[in-house]
Image (cartoon, helix red, strand yellow):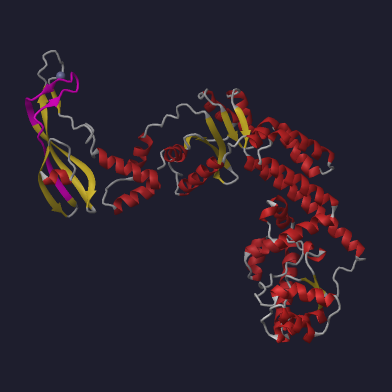
Amino acid sequence: MEGTALLQLPEGMRLAQIQITENGLVIEVIATHPSSCCPLCSEPSTSIHCHYHRTLRDVPCAGRRVQLFLTVRKFSCRNSYCPRKVFAERLLAFVEPWARMTIRHCQQLTSLGLATGGNGGTRLAARLGMQTSRQTILRRIMQLPDVSSGSVVYLGIDDFAFRRGWRFGTILVDLESHRVVDLLPDRHMETSAAWMYQHPDLFVVSRDRASAYASAASEAAPQALQIADRFHILKNLTEATQILLARCQAEIREASRQKDGGHELPTKHVFSVEEWRPLEPAHVEKVRRARRAGRHERYQLVIELHEQGMNPKRIAQRLDLSERTIQKWIAAETFPETKRRRKRQSCFNAFAPYVLKRWQDGEHHGASLVRELIEQGYTGSERTVYRYLEVFKQAEVKASASLHRLHKFSANAAIWLFVRDPKALDEIEREDLAAFCHMSTTLKRVYDLVQDFLCMVQKREGERLDTWLAQVAESALPELQSFAAGVEKDKDAVRAGLTWSINNGMVEGHVTKLKLIKRQGYGKAGFPLLRKRVLHAL
Ligand SMILES: [Zn+2]
């Protein structure tokens, strides 16, 4: 009796014997229920016709494989109207009539398969004391019934890549229940439309900016409100702004070059106050220069070979450099200087702006400056102050955010000053931004327009969209105008995106999970397996 409970055998089964063999446990179980119901007429019968044996695989016990040796009976049906004379007793909820494994074993294999895929599931099962094959696991998964998506009212739709940039599928998420409701094998308009036709309850379709899903929804779910996802809208705006910044920077650089009369490099180095640090000792400086010269030579060689038509891989092999470095150098327009190590925190830093100001005011007497600093709470050494002052002999230090520093900004870096919440910028970033806007009225105009759009997104002020578009139309900024033209084509959905709180963030989350499942491999069993695994994911 205790054994029956321990092995969780159903009622009416008696544990007869447990044998430990080389391959695991063989458990003999005898069915003892006094009656069984005829599967045809459902009438219970107590007349036993004969006994027979079944061998079943069962869930492992303490890491050992388990084989059930089951003694079951056949009953005679006593219902004289029933055509069935003899029937095998049913052990419902424990084993299917013709199966060779128990239902609970089958469920465990399915869970393993859903979590790890065919090959992974087979390997893991072996570790856990379950004998199975990849085919069995795959069959179990494929036999799972499709979960009925039922009525979907708020739908999120997006694509995902089977192969990055190559082949795509579509993921559909119920934004109310937070569940993936289906996976489609491509991202064609017809496929999504066919799915939407079967779901007439759709009230909202939240989607990206691609036209396929827009057309599908317009055709198959004309009653639904389409919402363009805010993330995708902002991404488009960011890309447009980045192109614009790159153009403006090039223009500014050109203008300042002409102003300098072609003298590109000033004789003196210029540092901002944030970059100000003591000069390196002569021998360190010498080593650094030598290293730079070597690197510069290799750089020129790379460019030369590249211009001769050699591909990056060959260049990398020939010069014993990494291919990634070669690609970076080729992509860079000019020789990329190595980044100098971060400035070490010094107790002088806090006083640097003050010292700089005093120096520019004409106070060049070291001892007096030190005295002033100590009065203000400076606790560092006198020597440190002198080392900082020495820099003035060889270089110029500027208050902050000089034109020189802004030149070093790539459009990639500058874009973040433009599209982030100004409150999230630190002091230096704010100065850089102010310098940008000061430098050119175009940049200032761009900044105002971009921030206005972001504000509209954040505060859900979709009703201001038309005013914003009109301002862009007057702005003479072709990059933003091309963004606006895209918005104009899809204006209702964009406005809805800027008005409603719904967005596709949840769908993105499911795409991330899907990628994890995909990486475990679904190759041989194809899309249907991936679909089952995503829909039944734990
Ligand atoms: Zn019967």
Closest to the observer: 265 or 226? 226
Any magenta on residue 38? yes
Closest to the observer: 194 or 261? 261
- Which residue is most to the top? 81
Q: Is residue 537 left or right of residue 136?
A: right
Residue at x-position 41% and y-position 31%: 146
Quarter of the rendering containing residue 158:
top right
Quarter of the rendering containing residue 433:
bottom right
Q: Can you see residue 184?
A: no
Could you say where residue 133 lies in the image, as x and y percent from the top left? 32, 45
**Quadrant where ligand 1 appears:** top left
Q: Quadrant of the N terminus?
A: top left
Could you say where residue 45 lies in the image, as x and y percent from the top left? 10, 23
Q: Is residue 250 left or right of residue 46?
A: right
Q: Can you see residue 141?
A: yes
Q: Is residue 65 above or below residue 220?
A: below
Could you say where residue 196 lies in the image, as x and y percent from the top left? 54, 26
Residue at x-position 65% and y-position 69%: 318
Closest to the observer: 327 or 466? 466
Q: Quadrant of the C terminus?
A: top left
Q: Is residue 488 above or below residue 405?
A: above
> What is the magenta range?
25-50
Q: Is residue 388 left or right of residue 167?
A: right
Residue at x-position 53% and y-position 31%: 154
Quarter of the rendering containing residue 489:
top right
Q: How many marks?
A: 0
Residue at x-position 89% and y-position 69%: 263
Any magenta on residue 485? no
Q: Is residue 437 left or right of residue 526?
A: right
Q: Is residue 19 above or below residue 496?
A: below
